[in-house]
Amino acid sequence: MSSEIQTRRCSRCTLPGNLRNIRFDNNGVCNFCHNHDKYIEKFRRFSLAKKNFLNQVKANRGKFKYDCAAGLSGGLDSTYVLYKLVQDYNLKVLAITFDNHFQTELAKEYIKTIVDDLKVDHITIAYDDREQHYQLYKEAAIQVGRACTACGFHGLNMQRYCFDHKIPFFVHGRSRPQMLREISEYTFDPYLPLYAINYRQFNFQEYMQLTKSARKNIDRIMKRLIKNPATREEFKSKYFIDPVECEKQQFIPQYIAFFLMEDYNDDEITTFFEKKVLKDKNKKLKHHHHNDCLAHPAFMYIYKQTFGWSLLEWELAFDVREGKISREYALTLIENDDMVNEIPEESFKLVCSKMNTSRQDLLDGLSIARRNIRMYTKLRKIKSFFKIRSFKI
């Protein structure tokens, strides 16, 4: 790859030239910007998404113990969402925390404060096998370059809990930059169709079809992370919902994206958290994001070493397109992102001790992830050439 491609950035949003599937027009504007402009208005119909959700809650009210469940990590976004659901939406919510065994003590303290303040029911769930749990993170780092993929499975685990306990909705607090950074009608993101469905009346068969499609992508990743077929199937049967069982019961917990019902304002959420959780006018958060996970700095460094760009760049590019920050400010944040530009020693020390590996072995192993990503990208391009994939927005 030439140095020009490596250093070139979109003239509008800052995305780098070595990003997967990126293309530039004659003015240096990338295809992600053009797709954003084409589709973003469809994802700004906040009142419609909220109306659809509340209508479904009303139709289900009284049938189940809880109106919905919501994830609670102790971080800013999940805290904000839980407060809004309880106090503004007036819903009976079960707060669910997934213990990834990298949780900070502050996060645990925040969770207790939040639960006590709101007086909501709260449970913590985790994978039973601690050794398998850490192996999953290790393989996610080495095989796909993104250890946080293992954390991504906790959403499926929570959906399984909701299925078993008949909770009709699981509300998540993924930010708009996280959800909508790769808007495209022919997206590679398996979850984007599930976000789009928030704007339509619920149809069980349509939701099941989208769920099965997303599960195919998840199954492909699982094959890389858990090599033994019997162990893999046992893991999925224990922690993931069974589409066949959903069909039998005609019941599936829906993922509801809160920030498709309300706009996302980082400053507002930070101020809200400081007021409601810190409860000290003179106390401010030092780190606004992922203050709930000790492993996050190491995992973000691994991601940057694998892909050549950081997840922060995706999110900053979205905010630039939305006019929430300037391109110049985004470039400054990228340049000064110590989390990916310098090795986070303490975080790596913890991660390696949990995974029973060394930092060097872990970083050396990322060559496998780079090879797998190259092969996957080529395969998806070939499939896209022969088969047009689209979804309703």
Image (cartoon, rainbow, N blue to C red):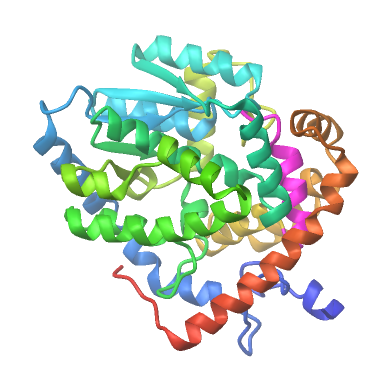
Q: Is 296 situated left or right of 336 in this image?
A: left
- Depicted 66 relative to depicted 370: above or below: above
Quick check: 337 above or below 235? below
Q: Is residue 64 left or right of residue 143?
A: left
Quarter of the figure with residue 250: top left
Farthest front residue in view: 230
Closer-to-camera residue (45/4)? 4
Q: Is 147 located above or below residue 385 in the figure? A: above
As for residue 89 lying within the magenta part, the answer is: no
Q: State the image coordinates of residue 212 (x, y, percent, origin top left).
A: 34, 58
Point out residue 160 in the picture as x, y percentages from the top left corner. Answer: 36, 36
Specify the segment rendered in magenta. Answer: 292-309
| Left or right of 63 in this view: 29 | right
Residues 277 and 69: in front is 69
Q: Quadrant of the C terminus?
A: bottom left
Residue 328 percent across, percent down from the top left? 71, 61
Q: Nearer the viewer, residue 309 or 359?
A: 359
Q: Specify whether residue 121 is in view.
A: yes
Let me know if residue 307 is in the magenta part: yes
| Residue at x-position 10% and y-position 26% | 62
